[in-house]
Image: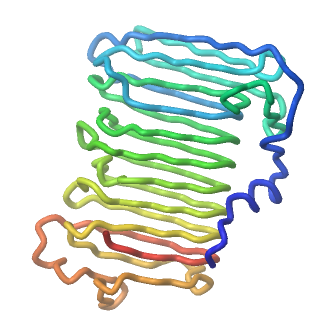
Amino acid sequence: MKTSFYPLVVAAVLCIPMWAAGQPQDTADEQFPFQVKGAKPLEVLMNVDAGELIVEKGTEAASGVVNVKYFKDEYRAKVSFEEKENRLRIRLDKDDWTDIKHNENDDEGHWARVHVVLPHGVDVLFDARLKAGECVMNVGGLRFREFVLSTWAGKTEVRFDEPNAIPMDDLEINAKVGETRLLKLGNARFKEASVNGGIGEMNVDFSGELEKDCRAKVDLDIGEATVRLPKAVGIRLHIGGSMGFLSHKSIDESFTKRGRYYYTDDYEDNARKVYVLVTPGLGELNIERE
């Protein structure tokens, strides 16, 4: 099963005309700087109906900026920062988020964009939702306590090229339809992680500086999935779920099955142990080690 599910699923299942040419429209391009003060963590709450969502680490320790670009007659944007609570709220609403038109006069080729630059010196509680579009996050080196991302339809890429500056309590990523790439999640330094894939192609890479005794769950529905695990840690792997018989599984030869679990050869002697639960659905599951 080597065919990518992304273009088929997004076009055929949801019938979203992602790149249909539209008439020139009046475009808003707005910036909202914010400054974090006090001891409370920065709380980021985002709800984007449609477009491109970009999140990245900034160069400032306590200040950041939100840039929102959109067509005025199709979208409504609202960005606010509650200084007392250190709470950043971002909304980009569209009446019919399944009807996404590309403006051919937009040189960058995006119907709408939310670009968030986060400060690197404050703890962050992060919760973002994108209904349709493209999500690109390169968020290594920040200070996430919690990280929650939900996408409904489109393409999602999240990467932690640098280790999270503090241990993260919870990492949760839900991708319902489309192509999903989660890279170097080990650098998120999570204690608990939950990755849920719906329909499409998913690549979940746990390489990086995994925390000792962390736990990760990967739940899959329909499509091709690759779960990549690091060699530096001892791994206890459980392939569970009631639909596992519908999937074709390829498990790295470094794992040995004993009872209900698969173990790496160094599991007993490795001081850093990780538990991974994968529940496959209909499709192909590949378990690899880097």
Question: Looking at the picture, does residue 269 appear above or below residue 65?
Answer: below
Residue in the foreground of this view, choosing between 137 and 165 = 137
Q: Quadrant of the C terminus?
A: bottom left
Query: Which residue is at a point 30% across and 84% down the rendered structure image?
Result: 255
The quadrant where residue 102 appears: top right
Query: Which residue is at a point 47% across and 46% down the rendered structure image?
Result: 158
The quadrant where residue 133 appears: top right
Count of all numbered marks drawn on residues in the image: 0
Query: Where is residue 150 shown, x and y percent of the image?
Result: 57, 45
Query: Where is residue 51 shown, x and y percent of the image?
Result: 68, 34
Question: Looking at the picture, does residue 245 appear above or below residue 107?
Answer: below
Q: Is residue 115 left or right of residue 110?
A: left
Colouring style: rainbow
Query: Which residue is at a point 27% across and 81% down the rendered structure image?
Result: 263
Query: Where is residue 9 shown, x and y percent of the image?
Result: 74, 60
Residue in the foreground of this view, choosing between 46 and 287 = 287
Q: Quadrant of the N terminus?
A: bottom right
Query: Where is residue 124 shown, x and y percent of the image?
Result: 36, 29
Query: Which residue is at a point 46% across and 16% down the rendered structure image?
Result: 65
